[in-house]
Image (cartoon, grey):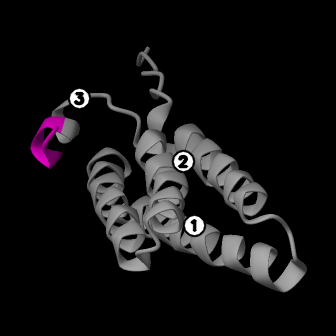
Amino acid sequence: MSTSSLLRTRFPSAALVAVGLAAGFGIAQGTGIRALGGAVFAAAGLAAGALWLRRRGPATAVALAALYVGAFVLAHVLAIGVGMSAWLAVSLVTLTAAGVTFGVVDVPREEVAAG
């Protein structure tokens, strides 16, 4: 699915967040090629960012991009610094970031009728 197709649909950007974080980690760990996992992380983030920008504007897109990158960093802190299982750390940050993204961008706004 191309980015232009994603922009025209109601495809949930939270799914892209989950793919970028969880699948990116899984691919990096499974293949041993960290750059490949990073490429998945970056591609999913760019696609999600395009949706955020179109659906909610630049301020929300920047805030969610910070959340996305922050979740990536936090997973490393939890796994390396705290000693948590890597998959548990990735799961926690993925669920949190995807949940916030869903609530902020993917839930359709109710149109309030004037009058």
> Is residue 2 rendered magenta in the image?
yes
| Left or right, 48 with reference to 34 | left
Q: Amino acid at mark 1?
A: Leu
Q: Residue at x 41, y 19 (%)?
A: 114
Q: Residue at x 62, y 48 (%)?
A: 100
State the residue position of label 1: 67
How would you classify the magenta stretch by its main secondary structure? Answer: helix
Q: Amino acid at mark 2?
A: Thr
Q: Amino acid at mark 3?
A: Thr
Q: Residue at x 28, y 54 (%)?
A: 47
> Which residues, given as a range, are shown in magenta?
1-5
State the residue position of label 2: 101
**C-alpha separation, residue under disc 1 versus residue under disc 3:** 23 Å
The disc at residue 23 is none
Q: Position of residue 76 (x, y in %)?
A: 68, 77
The crowding category of the residue bearing disc 3, from other C-alpha atoms within 10 Å (few below 14, some 14 to 19, many at least 20), is few
* 3 or 31, nearer to the observer: 31
Report helix, strand or loop for mark 3.
Answer: loop
| Left or right, 67 with reference to 93 | left
Label 1 with label 3: CB-CB less than 8 Å: no
Report helix, strand or loop for mark 1.
Answer: helix
Marked residue nearer the N-terminal end (1 or 2): 1
Q: Which image quadrant is residue 74 in?
A: bottom right
